[in-house]
Amino acid sequence: MGGYGTDGATARSAELYDPRSGTWSATAKMATAREDHTATLLPDDTVLVAGGLTGASDGLPAAELYDPRANQAPTR
């Protein structure tokens, strides 16, 4: 999730990997475009996305919570 888009701008996009099929699929975008962030799998199978850069700042003091089962945009 996140990183750089094909245009070189910081991205909001996210993808899910299926290890059984070896394929990636698009999923809900993040609320905030970010790069150089952390993504931590939590015990309830949600993913905490924290920090990083927006491309226009030295640091992003924000976090998002993504639930892959719901395939919904993260909440802050």
Image (cartoon, rainbow, N blue to C red):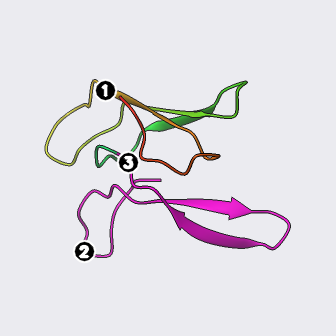
Mark 3 vs 2, N-terminal side: 2
> Which circle marks residue 30 in the picture?
3
Nearer mark to the viewer, of 1 and 2: 1
Q: In the figure, is residue 44 to the left or right of 53?
A: right
* Magenta highlight on residue 33: no
Q: Earlier in the sequence, mark 1 or mark 2?
A: 2
Mark 2 crowd level (few <14, some 14–19, many ≥20, 10 Å Cα)? few
Quadrant (top left, top right, bottom left, bottom right) of the C terminus: top left
Residue 6, placed above or below residue 36:
below
Q: CA distance from mark 3 to mark 1?
A: 12 Å
Q: Which mark is residue 62?
A: 1
- The numbered disc on residue 25 is none
Q: Is residue 38 above or below residue 61?
A: below
The residue lying at 40 percent from left, 53 percent from top is: 2
Determine the image quadrant of residue 15. Answer: bottom right
Q: Residue 7: give its label.
A: 2
- Of all residues, the one furthest to the right in this rendering is 20
Total marks in image: 3
Residue occupying the point 31% across, 44% down = 31
Q: Residue at x 28, y 40 (%)?
A: 53
Disc 3 is placed on an element classified as loop
Q: Which residue shows up at 41% across the image and 46% down it?
A: 73
Q: What are the residue bounds of the magenta stretch?
A: 1-30
Where in the figure is residue 17, as x and y percent of width and height? 68, 62
x and y percentages locating residue 16 in the rendered image: 62, 59
Q: Left or right of 54: which side holds 72?
A: right
Q: Residues within 10 Å of mark 1 (few under 14, many from 20)?
A: few
In terms of depth relative to the viewer, which is nearer, 20 or 8? Answer: 20
Q: Quadrant of residue 41?
A: top right
Crowd around label 3: few <14 · some 14–19 · many ≥20 (10 Å): many
Of the residues shown, which amino acid type is indicated by label 1? Ala
Q: Secondary structure at mark 1?
A: loop
